[in-house]
Image (cartoon, coloured by chain):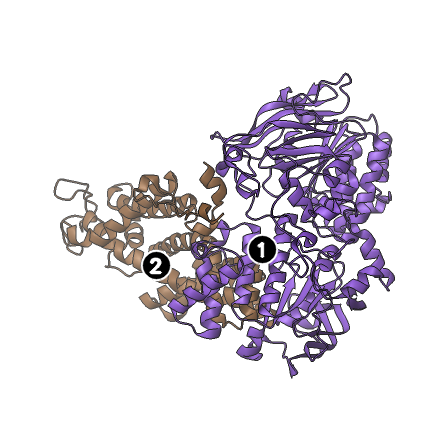
Amino acid sequence: MSAQVVDTEPVRLGRLAGSRRFSRRGIVGLGMVGVVVLVAIIGPFVAPDDAYRIYGAPYTPPSASHLLGLDYLGRDALSRFLAGGRSTLLLALAATAVGYAIGLTVGLLAAYRGGFLERILMRATDVLLVFPGLIFVLLLVAVYGSNTLLLIVGVGLANAPRIARVVYTAALRVVELPYIEYARAGGERIWYIARKELLPNIFSPIAVDFGIRLSGSILLIAGLSFLGFGIQPPAPDWGLIISENLTGFPVQPYCMIAPILAIAFLTVGINLIIDGWRGGSRASKDRSLANAR
Amino acid sequence: MLTPDNPGNHQDAAGLAVEDLRVDLDGTSFDVVRDVGFRCRPGEAIGIVGESGSGKTTVGMALLGYTRPGMSIRAGRVLIDGTDVLSLTADKATRIRGRTISYVPQEPAKALSPAMRVGRQIAEMLDGQEPDGQAVADRVAAACEAAQLPFDTELLRRYPHELSGGQQQRVAIAMALAARPRVVVMDEPTTGLDVMVQSRLLDVIRRIRATTGASIVYISHDLGVVRSLVDKVVVLYGGRIAEAGSTDDIFRSPVHPYTRRLIAAVPRLDGPRLRLRGIPGSAPQPSSRVPGCPFAPRCALATDQCEHQMPPVTQTPTGYVRCWHAGEPDPEMVGPETAGPGTAGEQPAGSRAPAGAALLTLTDLHAVYRRRVSLLRASRDTTAVAVASLSLSIGDGECVALVGESGSGKTTIARCVAGLHRWTSGQMTFAGRPVPADPRKRGSGLRRSIQIVFQDPDGSLNPQMPVAELLGRPLKRDFNLPPRARTARSAELLDLVHLPASYTRRYPAELSGGEKQRVALARALAARPRLLVCDEITSALDVAVQASILELLMELRAELAMAILFISHDLAVVRAISDRVVVLRAGIVRESRGTDELFAAPADSYTSELLAAVPDLPPGDYSGFASQI
């Protein structure tokens, strides 16, 4: 009997093309996001010109010396695009992280503790859910004025109730399972239960939600910058670049085409990754069928 | 009379005939089911039995020309009154489903549309068959009558969620009968239902068989139910028929080693209290079968020939068997008589219960269930009484069984003892000291002393943790063992539950149901408990796996000298394992006595009712022991 028990650990294929974790669609998404992230990281170092210097007349069309032409003040559009990715991505990541710090705590606590605490937390979440994200951040900006920290916290707060809802709903199914009860009967602390018993088992919906929140944050920050409440000029930022040059769109569309494409790539790419992610955990697979094929 | 090769060569083609059915996994050469053939005449009932993974449901669905996604019917014929279902066009096949052959699924709650009134769901089965509304209503009434649903318009206007489990299943049966089909396939229709509800439903099915003249194919792993219901039995193992024959022959004198082991694993209400024996190992996946007899890897009689060559079909008085060693005695099935006195066979019933101090006592315990009504105000929540004024004590090393229907409060008691449910009043003491309801207030020693194993093997283990971590956590938390000592002790614990030490690397998804329960047991034993609470730990398992878990539990109890609070709805299981039985109904103790006295002569009328509802094997059936055959 025990002679038959051989370890069935699958060989993880190194090649992406044969990935067990992502479908082809997911790999395309990874590629798209990878390109944008690469641009954001190395962009500032490879920029041909100074992002802040004025080189000629506003809205000069593309030429050999300025591949994407000049923007509304006569600055090099390509260099501003290459320099502007970092702030967009970092802000979005930071804001999503803030949102998760709050949303995860609230969602898990409400689902696990239940009772009075659950009612208070989830009703408060419902109230906050009423405000659209953009309006919520605009409200904060109107009261406290615009700065980077407020932007991060504001966008994070706008995300938090939505995250809390997703986490709460996912955790609700798990908290009643016997293995959580076993941990509870064993006197485990809530920190251990949340970290080891709850989180790993609601990882899939949370990973999907993380992608949605991240691309949402990018759009929200770009939108805020576009409205003039996000990143302040003259800083190069993708959202800001689009908003600054909007009036020149009929004469010189090329100065804004790169950031538009980059944001589109990023959001589409993230969504493709989410779609193509097969759930990486070994535990979630029906191994009998997988082995048979 | 069943013949394997050509069951359809009878003069009259009436009824159901299945020939050489084969279902394959798509894109592979693995077969899920192969060479399955049987015949069921009008008014006859045939049982298809086997463990989970034996291909029972695949066969049942294939009779309707249907397979689950990922499989397809590769060969064979399914003849109903001479017409081959499998050769029909998709369009025609759809039309005969529900009319000529119908299907009663295992979980009615999932099979009924939640958005449609049940009356309409029944009427829908008659789509276009009757000229006017009155005729349809008459047919619906007839179907309800057959399924013994009270035919009143009020009930038919309800939605599925407004019905009880038993009523839902009757609606599903009424749907299956509405179009007066020639064949009804029932796939575990009573599994998951309460004993009492099951017993009433089985009466319904018996009546249908007698009155409608339909052929009934009854798929189940519950041998007691099958025994009491069908004329013929097909025993399926590894997708192949191991043995087939009349019900009496199969149960009284089975010849295939698998059938013998399966029947011997059924706990009985009559006869001596014998030790149950499981079948080691688990049913093979289609991809891991040996080329010969699929049972060979688990069979005590297996030889090289068994592993490599498919055994030929041998005729038996009322059917046939596919085995190289049909009818040979199984060396592992040795009775207490031949093994000599004092060995494993007879349980030292009653003698273990000590007269000394009680380990656990519950005094006047009350517990309620909360139902949420208001979104905001907890004070508006309603409560339902789960346990009322319950007193109970368990002696050191004693095994006390708690039995009752669902809703009797037995699980609530288990949860109170384990610290998962707060009781509203009353006391609990353990070894003379009071036990608080909150597990965090119990202190590490008390928490360790009381351990629980749950019913649902799939939910008991965190799917993201390998066995090493599942067992390692209580060792670290409760004993603060260093990593190396944890590994050693984990291996020791796995050995205690008869699993190889290599299992520490496995994840729960890589374990079978029985193996999961063994790991859950090992995890509970890690704490070296003095009281083990077993909440329906075998009710989700097949009969053979159940027997091996019970066998293990008795062995552990003798070895580790712990008390057991064994919760179950199955009286036959309770009889096999407990020293004392407490019968509960609606949160109140009806009877509490020594196991032998209670089964010899139940004092309470409710106990007798429960006993009568158990679909038991009759005393003359095969038990695995020479003296009894």
Amino acid residing under circle 2: Leu
Query: Which chain's colour is purple?
Result: B
Q: Using the rendered image of the protein, determine whether residue A130 is visible from the camera's viewpoint.
A: no
Residue B310: horizontal and vertical position, in percent? 55, 30
Amino acid residing under circle 1: Pro
Q: Name the residue under label 2.
A: A93
Check disc 2: other Cα within 10 Å, few if <14, some if 14-19, many if 20+. some
Q: Is residue B392 left or right of residue A158?
A: right
Front in this rendered view, residue A259 or B520 = B520
Query: Which chain's colour is brown?
Result: A
Identify the mark at residue B606; answer none if there is no mark: none
Element type at mark 2? helix
Q: Mark 1 lies on which chain?
A: B
Q: Who's the residue at 72% across and 19% down the image?
A: B82
Q: Mark 1 points at which residue?
A: B457
Residue B616 vertical placement versus B454 (above, below) = above
Front in this rendered view, residue B203 or A168 = B203
Q: In which quarter of the image is residue B600?
A: bottom right
